[in-house]
Amino acid sequence: MNTRIRTALGLGIALALATGGASATNGYYMHGMGTKNKAQAGAGIADPQEVLILATNPAGIAFVPESIDAGLAIFSPMREYSTSASQAPGACFAPGQCLLTVGPNDIASQNEFFPIPHFAMNWALSDADFLATAFYARGGMNTKWEGGTVTYDPSFGMMPGATAQTFDGTFGDGTAGVDLMQGFLNLTYARKFSDQFSLGASAILAVQRFEARGVERFYPFTKTFVSTSTPTAPGEMPRNLSDNGHDMSYGYGASVGFQWNLNDMFSVAAGYTTKMSMSEFNDYSDLFAEHGDFDMPSTWQAGIAVRPNDDWTLMFDVQGISYSDAASVSNGIEGLTEGKCRFVSVEYCLGGNKGAGFGWEDMTVYKLGASWDYSDTWTWRAGFSTTDQPIPKDQMTFNILAPGVMEEHFTVGFTQKLDSGNEVNFSFMFAPNVKVKGPQNFDPTQSVTFEMTQVEAELSYSWKR
């Protein structure tokens, strides 16, 4: 391995490990992988142009020239939430659903700029065998809600004898929010069975870093508290719920895919990534379902590329994200608000096997992209993607922590080929404002409104070997 490759590899590892969590675009998945792909709104699985194609279709590396790619995105999600005034008389609405009135608040998240790096390189082992590796960040969410108030009804948590109190913070425990980072090490092999067809597979190691802040007052709804206490003998407070700093989780998964260039005009491709089986967040075992488990959902993507002439390529992709694979993300809040935690089974409590989560639904994303070879040195790109955001309107309260509500992405970008043969790539993404409004789960006379707008700019450099 020569000095340039060693230096680039070390830089890629350092960048990948230094990334912060933030990229909540399609839920908490990115709108594309790789600078060229992002400039096309994530379309282009059937038109592999960069090594990071391995993140969606490992077979694509068989059609990418030997390269070392490194890039950095600056991602900016602008988020805020507001709550209306309560009209409640101050009592439970149903067994176990006792009054927790948020505000009324109107707060913008303090975290708005995040670096997201990537590094990838590939090798042609022979005319038919290809190897690639990549370090990249994907997914994540980071919110920081400072200020606001919350008022608890005397019977909140089914604890008679308490008095109504108002506390500072979105959930009454000071600054609230979550910080999730996900990083990946991907090793990919692909084989060409002809000049038109390839198959590929990836082994993927994953790491997560998570922190929750400002949710300590939900302790009456944790499995630890309910299973060890009575209303007159509270027992030991759960220690693995909130404000425990960053905890780490490790796991693995795999992906497979194919690339088929039918002729000079048409190509088709598809890829599937398994669920990432992750270790538990032990420091947050009283927060997430299944005792702190936070597996990463499986995904799939399929697409077609059409080349009407030598200068233009048009692409259409469909992507699926299966949030239902992860109970901590897909479980609804009903276990708390309908009294199941208290009166049916502690497994419906926070931390239980059926514990409350964010209630996210599976997503299907539709992506259109185009590239135009304007000259021998310049290629221009553009794209558009659309989907339905994953948060149901009856799951608003917990999603204040992670309002991943984006639906549309508009993208542009370019590639400039230098005299050396190396490339400079740029992409820009704009996701217009999305507003979601629904009832506050612990006080349905209140409404909660999320709003988010996003922009991202990414620059990368590709060394051709």
Image: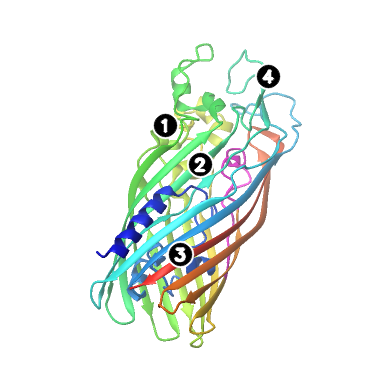
Residue occupying the point 57% across, 42% down = 143
Position of residue 234 measured from the top left corner of the image (x, y, whole percent): 50, 15
Give above or below for 45 relative to 208: below
The residue to which callout 2 is attached is 179
The reply, left or right, for residue 87 in relation to residue 151 is: right
Inter-mark Cα distance, 1 to 3: 33 Å
Residue drawn 63% across the image and 15% down it = 162
Secondary structure at badge 1 equals helix
Q: Are marks 3 and 4 in contact (CB under 8 Å)?
A: no
Say whether residue 213 is magenta: no
Q: Provide the residue designation for mark 4.
A: 164
| Dot placed on the residue nearer the N-terminal end, 1 or 2 | 2
Mark sitting earlier along the chain (2/4): 4
Q: Is residue 462 above or below residue 243?
A: below
Chief secondary structure of the magenta portion: loop
Q: Nearer the viewer, residue 104 or 18?
A: 18
Type of the residue with mark 4:
Ala
Which quadrant is home to the C terminus? bottom left
User: CA separation, marks 3 and 4?
Assistant: 52 Å
Residue 444: where, in percent of width, then height?
Answer: 68, 35
Using the image as rendered, state which of residue 293 and residue 61 is in the foreground.
61
Write the residue at 32% across / 64% down: 4
* Pick the front one: 455 or 149: 455
Disc 4 from disc 1: Cα separation: 30 Å
Q: Amino acid at mark 1?
A: Asp
**Residue 144 falls in which quadrant of the image?**
top right
Mark 2 element type: strand
Looking at the rendered image, the disc whose residue lies closer to the viewer, 1 or 3, is 3
Disc 1 target residue: 283
Give the labeled residue for mark 3: 34
Kind of residue at badge 3: Gly
